């Protein structure tokens, strides 16, 4: 097959003569780039490439840990161990304090609890989002530290 630059009409005739399709590869280029090929085969290969790229992409797993504003020390330590395990396994951590009823007046306790958790998990993860109040929840995200 001889490759060259053809005017559009000539390229269409050439594609028709070969029994193939004229596919526009890069429409924004000046002049637009076209290729003579089987369009169905092109679509199939493109889908195959996208599927392979999607399979290679890492899935982000988000684990959640829920606290109350008055969580005692034993429960806090138990949940902290779980959080540490999640981060070591490579999952992101969403730690939140849920305020029931009138316990919303203890916003400062909830924030202190989350900041304490962040400081104690500093060696295994880094804070992605500082504690933020959203309705009745105060949420904080911690991402695992990358291994070198």
Image (spheres, rainbow, N blue to C red):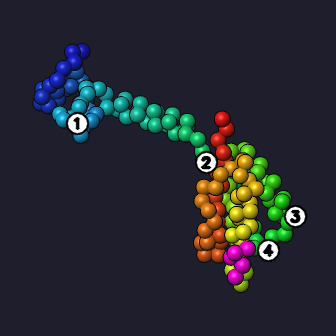
Image disc number at residue 70: 4
To which residue does mark 1 refer? 29
For image coordinates 27% across by 36% down, the residue present is 26
Instruction: State the SS at label 4.
Output: loop
Please indicate, yes or no, whether residue 13 appears anywhere in the rendered image. Answer: no
Residue at position x 81%, y 63% from top?
Answer: 76
In the rendered structure, find residue 47 and report the number of the disc placed on it: none
The residues tagged by marks 4 and 2 sit, at their Cα atoms, a distance apart of 31 Å
- Which SS type dominates the magenta stretch? helix
- State the CA–CA distance, disc 3 to disc 2: 30 Å
Quick one: 94 or 2, which is closer to the camera? 94
- Disc 1 and disc 3 in contact, CB within 8 angstroms: no
Residue at point 69%, 75% (across, down): 108
- Marks 1/2 in contact by CB < 8 Å: the verdict is no
Depicted 103 relative to depicted 12: above or below: below
Label 3, on which residue? 74
């Amino acid at each position: 097959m001889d490759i060259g630059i053809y005017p559009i009409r000539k390229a269409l005739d050439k594609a028709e003569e070969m029994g193939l399709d004229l596919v526009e590869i890069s429409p924004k280029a000046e002049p637009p780039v076209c290729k003579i090929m089987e369009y169905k085969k092109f679509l199939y290969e493109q889908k195959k490439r996208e599927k392979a790229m999607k399979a290679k992409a890492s899935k982000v797993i988000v684990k959640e840990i829920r606290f109350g504003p008055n969580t005692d020390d034993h429960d806090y330590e138990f949940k902290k161990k779980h959080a540490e395990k999640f981060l070591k396994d490579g999952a992101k951590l969403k730690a939140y304090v849920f305020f029931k009823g009138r316990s919303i007046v203890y916003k400062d306790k909830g924030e202190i609890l989350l900041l304490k958790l962040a400081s104690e998990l500093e060696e295994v993860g880094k804070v992605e989002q500082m504690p933020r109040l959203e309705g009745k929840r105060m949420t904080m995200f911690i991402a695992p530290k990358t291994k070198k």
